[in-house]
């Protein structure tokens, strides 16, 4: 290994060309994670991505300004890979919960339909949603009164009661 | 890894994109956006960029790569 280039962990530092090559294992970091991280480094660096998505991803980083901190840049890249990969894993784990919450929110504010316009499928879906969410499992304190539906709190009937 | 080749005689830069990583639509969009400043030709995965004004051929190539990454992020 000559003085102009050196290997450290998954980093190949090329001082002569002023660049660093990072070897990424796609079994740990999917391509979309690598590309997302690569993008955030484009602010201060030029980024090129190559390799084989099934074997090895190679990220080539050229700082826009001459710097001797090539190794630091490589290690920052590794840190961001962990950061984004962790986020991606959590997003997958939470996807069902997030979807369920969004369904609940949209159903709560959906206008009530008369029997003539409601199809059997819609009735079945709404019934299923109610059984999926047992209100007793979702009891929580609401000291600020935020969880009260808008209609209940400010609706026309409420105004008439106040007169 | 030669992803950027400089041809000083013809004043052009040759870029090679790996379709496994770079979205083809993003590359096409970048080509379209750069045409205002450069003459660009595409053959297979190779893009030849010839700036209309005197420019650093390396920088143009690198900026093109970064630009494609940016387009992919917003897709």
Image (spheres, rainbow, N blue to C red):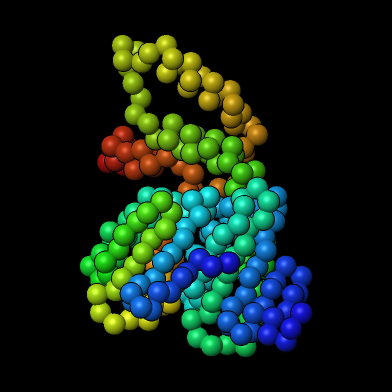
Residue A152 lies in what quarter of the image?
Answer: top left
Residue B55 lies in what quarter of the image?
Answer: bottom left
* Quarter that holds the C terminus of chain A: top left
A117 left or right of B2 in image: left
Relative to residue A144, is residue B11 depicted above or below? below
Question: Residue A97: percent from the left, percent from the top?
Answer: 59, 39
A45 left or right of A114 in image: right
- Residue name at image x 62 percent, y 75 percent: A20
Q: Nearer the viewer, residue A35 or A101?
A: A35
Relative to residue A7, is residue A101 depicted above or below? above
Residue B32 lies in what quarter of the image?
Answer: bottom left
Q: Is residue A143 visible?
A: no
- Residue name at image x 26 percent, y 66 percent: B39
Relative to residue A114, is residue A156 depicted above or below? below
Which residue is most to the front?
B9
Question: Residue B35: percent from the left, percent from the top?
Answer: 25, 64
Question: Residue A37: percent from the left, percent from the top?
Answer: 56, 63
Q: Nearer the viewer, residue A114 or B5?
A: B5
- Residue name at image x 58 percent, y 67 percent: B1
Relative to residue B59, is residue B4 depicted above or below? above
Question: Residue A41: percent from the left, percent from the top?
Answer: 52, 71
Q: Nearer the viewer, residue A144 or A91?
A: A91
* Quarter that holds the N terminus of chain A: bottom right
Q: Is residue A31 visible?
A: yes
Q: How many marks?
A: 0
- Residue name at image x 69 percent, y 73 percent: A12
């Amino acid at each position: 290994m000559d003085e102009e280039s050196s290997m450290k962990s998954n980093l190949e530092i090329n001082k002569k060309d002023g660049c660093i090559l990072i070897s990424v294992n796609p079994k740990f970091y999917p391509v979309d994670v690598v590309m997302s991280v690569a993008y955030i480094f484009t602010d201060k660096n030029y980024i090129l991505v190559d390799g084989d998505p099934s074997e090895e991803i190679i990220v080539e980083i050229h700082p826009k300004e001459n710097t001797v901190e090539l190794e630091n840049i490589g290690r920052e890249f590794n840190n961001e890979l962990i950061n984004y990969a962790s986020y991606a894993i959590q997003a997958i784990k939470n996807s069902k919960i997030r979807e369920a919450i969004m369904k609940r929110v949209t159903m709560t504010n959906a206008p009530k339909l008369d029997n003539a316009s409601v199809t059997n499928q819609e009735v079945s879906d709404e019934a299923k949603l109610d059984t999926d969410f047992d209100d007793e499992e979702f009891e929580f304190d609401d000291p600020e009164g935020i969880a009260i539906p808008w209609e209940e709190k400010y609706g026309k009937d409420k105004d008439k009661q106040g007169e | 890894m030669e992803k950027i080749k400089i041809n000083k005689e013809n004043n052009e830069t040759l870029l090679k994109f790996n379709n496994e990583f770079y979205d083809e639509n993003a590359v096409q969009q970048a080509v379209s956006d750069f045409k205002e400043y450069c003459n660009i030709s595409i053959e297979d995965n190779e893009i030849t960029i010839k700036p209309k004004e005197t420019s650093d051929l390396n920088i143009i190539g690198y900026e093109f790569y970064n630009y494609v990454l940016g387009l992919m992020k917003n897709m």
